[in-house]
Amino acid sequence: MSATIFTEKEAKEASIELITDPAKGRQAVHDVVVAMRANRRSGTACTKTKGEIRASGAKPWRQKGTGRARAGDRASPIWVGGGVVFGPRPRSYAKHTPKKVKVLAFRKALSERILAGDILLVDAFAITEPKTKNFLTTLTGLAKDARKTLVIGNGFDENTYLSARNVRTASLARAADVNTEQLLAFDKIIVTKEALTTLSERLAS
């Protein structure tokens, strides 16, 4: 199994329109990545207010004569174990991103990686035996200097998935599902020829 650098000329032959303007699409990439990370936040952090604290409603001590400050509630925020003022409450961090912005960001990220020579093209990618060692050996042969590698294909067989699942420095992604954040997160990207056709169709639609 061998890989070749996917060039700008080959991108044009594959009907992939590249963005060569450095400024175009940068904001779209930022907006999409920020939205994707925000959408993954659970938003379940929660603190109790004064009214939600389980405490006696009795006055801790009498109003006058003790020499201490006036106190009327054991759930007061100024007490240890009391309520929290303006603490976090369950909420959604989701951000909406227009479809055109997503497409622009994806095209920009893909263009940058192609122009930088970070995308490697292979005929097919498959591991015949479900062993992590075989997977790492194959990756090293295709992308020698890469610390993190993304492999994009239309689909992978069970042996390939089993071989890659314990490798933290590599990831498998389907061409129909790969996103902008993934294109930016890896040093090298290995793409099969079938997946290349799918990526071209995604950008054309």
Image (cartoon, rainbow, N blue to C red):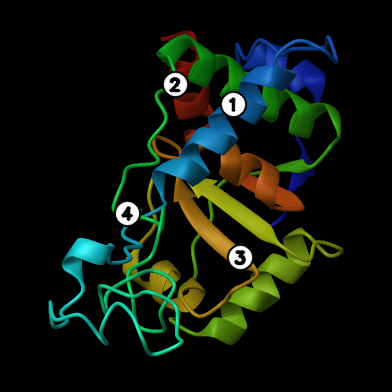
User: SS class of the residue under badge 2?
Assistant: loop
State if disc 4 and disc 1 touch (CB < 8 Å): no
| Disc 2 and disc 1 in contact, CB within 8 angstroms | yes
Question: Closer to the camera: disc 4 or disc 2?
Answer: 4
Cα gap from disc 1 to disc 3, whole angstroms: 25 Å
Name the mark on residue 31.
Answer: 1
Q: Dot 1: what SS?
A: helix
Q: CA distance from mark 4 to mark 2?
A: 24 Å
Q: Which residue is located at x 65 percent, y 76 percent?
A: 136
Disc 1 residue type? Asp
Residue at image location 60% in from the left, 11% down from the top: 15
Closest to the camera, between mark 1 and mark 3, is 1
Residues at discs 4 and 3 in contact (Cβ within 8 Å): no
Which circle's residue, 3 or 2, is located before the other in the chain?
Answer: 2
- Amino acid marked by disc 3: Ala
Q: Nearer the viewer, residue 129 or 173?
A: 173
Q: CA distance from mark 1 to mark 4?
A: 25 Å
Q: Which residue is mark 2?
A: 97
Q: Quadrant location of residue 183?
A: top right
Whether residue 130 can be seen here? yes
Which residue is most to the front?
65
- Helix, strand or loop at disc 4? loop
